[in-house]
Image (cartoon, rainbow, N blue to C red):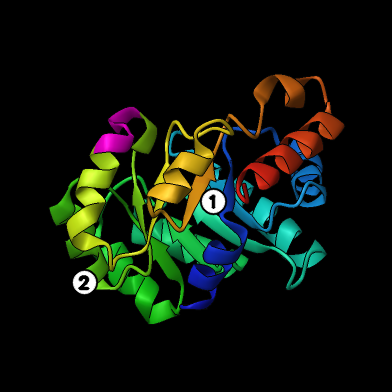
């Protein structure tokens, strides 16, 4: 799977982040995202939940089984090797983390799972990449600001990065033009109000809008 996720990110740009969605609605949201054009999906672990491994695994398996070969599915907020193993068993093709954990990166490489750690500084970014991360998530990109991102990326532009945190349909194009190979979009795309109202058509249209914004 290493190599595949990088190429898929270059092609499809947007990774939709599913976080904190009730089990009885998550499948409907996944379907709406797919119908809107999303082809990269991150299902996060809720680190406070005692059932995090079960809940995340169920959503990953659903997407993998329904969209075989048509959607790349990974796990998010992977902060331990145990999280990684649970994600891998469920079929996750990639993992994202909010931090840099070299044990997780090393194990992901062994399992042929694409590791995408979260980093903020040039040292974190470079050391993660050298340890085997295929992409690095610059986080939180939106809060740090585009000028910071450009300054950091300039001397290490050989490292593929995605922007996560504070990216929306209005600034997405700016981040992509700055050199990011893609972006992770959470609540701006998986809108909690729409989900609470079971407005899955609204989610589909929102996904479509983001996909259109990614190619402008």
Specify the label residue 136 is tagged with: none
Q: Is residue 141 left or right of residue 155?
A: right
SS at mark 1?
helix
| Residue drawn at x 70%, y 19% as measured from the top left | 193
Mark pair 2, 1: CA separation: 29 Å
Residue contact at pointers 2 and 1, CB within 8 angstroms = no
| Residue drawn at x 59%, y 29% as measured from the top left | 188
* Residue 92 in view: no
| Residue drawn at x 27%, y 36% as measured from the top left | 147
Question: Would you call the spot at circle 1 few (<14 residues within 10 Å), some (14-19), or many (20 or more)?
Answer: many
Residue 145 is a magenta residue: yes
Residue 153 is a magenta residue: no
Dot in front, 2 or 1: 2
How far across and down, in percent of the image, does residue 18 sit?
A: 60, 41
User: Which residue has dot 2 on it?
Assistant: 130
To which quarter of the image does residue 200 belong? top right
* Main SS, magenta residues: helix
25 vs 214: above or below: above
User: Which residue has dot 1 on it?
Assistant: 53
């Amino acid at each position: 799977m290493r190599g595949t996720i990088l190429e898929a990110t270059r092609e499809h740009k947007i990774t939709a982040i599913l976080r904190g969605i009730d089990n009885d609605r998550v499948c409907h949201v996944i379907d709406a995202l797919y119908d809107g054009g999303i082809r990269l999906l991150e299902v996060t672990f809720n680190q406070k939940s005692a059932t995090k491994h079960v809940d995340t695994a169920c959503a990953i398996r659903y997407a993998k089984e329904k969209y075989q070969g048509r959607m790349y599915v990974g796990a998010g907020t992977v902060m331990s090797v145990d999280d990684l193993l649970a994600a891998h068993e469920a079929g996750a093709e990639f993992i994202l983390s909010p931090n840099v954990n070299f044990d997780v990166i090393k194990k992901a490489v062994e399992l042929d799972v694409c590791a995408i750690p979260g980093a903020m500084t040039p040292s974190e970014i470079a050391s993660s990449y050298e340890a085997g991360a295929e992409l690095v998530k610059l986080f939180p990109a939106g809060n740090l600001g585009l000028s910071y991102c450009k300054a950091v990326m300039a001397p290490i532009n050989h490292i593929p990065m995605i922007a996560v945190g504070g990216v929306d349909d209005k600034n997405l194009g700016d981040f992509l033009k700055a050199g990011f190979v893609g972006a992770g979009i959470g609540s701006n795309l998986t809108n909690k109000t729409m989900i609470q109202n079971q407005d899955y058509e609204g989610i589909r249209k929102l996904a479509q809008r983001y996909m259109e914004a990614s190619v402008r």
